[in-house]
Image (cartoon, rainbow, N blue to C red):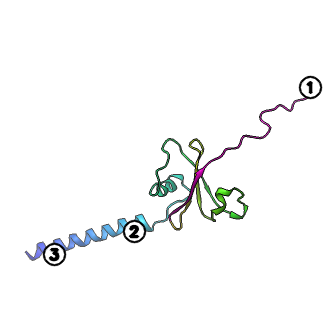
Amino acid sequence: MKGNRRTLLFGFAVLIVACGAAIGVNYFVPQDLNDVTVVQGKIERHVILPANEVPALVTVTDPEKIDTPFLKQAQKGDKVLIYQNNRKAIIYRPNVDRLIDIGPVVIDSPKGGSQSNSKGD
């Protein structure tokens, strides 16, 4: 009986250590926030993302240079997912795990169209 109890306690201790290791790997191992699938995974915990498109991922490096109203609230280190076909952009702040804003993507047409600059015959 004493041997079974010791085996049971040992098994329980191993289970606790294994669970602690699994939790530690998921929460404390840094993830590559330059990988679009990692960032999508973090954002998907907050909002449903378009499934029919792989977005572009942009990292805000110098908020002082941002001139679009939508991105004015972005801070250095924020991640921006841009879904061109779905015309949606998402600003995500990884250090607080929050969505900052979701807005429409406006794609400007090139000015001047496709006019030819060739001269004469």
Q: Report whether residue 74 is seen.
A: yes
Q: Residue at x 87, y 30 (%)?
A: 118
Q: Residue at x 42, y 66 (%)?
A: 27
Q: Nearer the viewer, mark 3 or mark 1?
A: 1
The numbered dot on residue 36 is none
Q: Badge 2 is on which residue?
A: 24
Amino acid type of the residue tagged 3 in the rendering: Arg
Using the rendered view, name the quadrant where residue 80 is placed.
Answer: bottom right
Q: Quadrant of the C terminus?
A: top right
The numbered dot on residue 6 is 3
Circles 3 and 2: CB atoms closer than 8 Å:
no
* Magenta residues, start to end: 97-121
Of the numbered discs 2 and 1, the one sitting upstream in the chain is 2
Q: Residue at x 67, y 44 (%)?
A: 107
Using the rendered view, name the quadrant where residue 76 is placed.
Answer: bottom right
SS assignment at label 2: helix
16 vs 74, left or right, is left
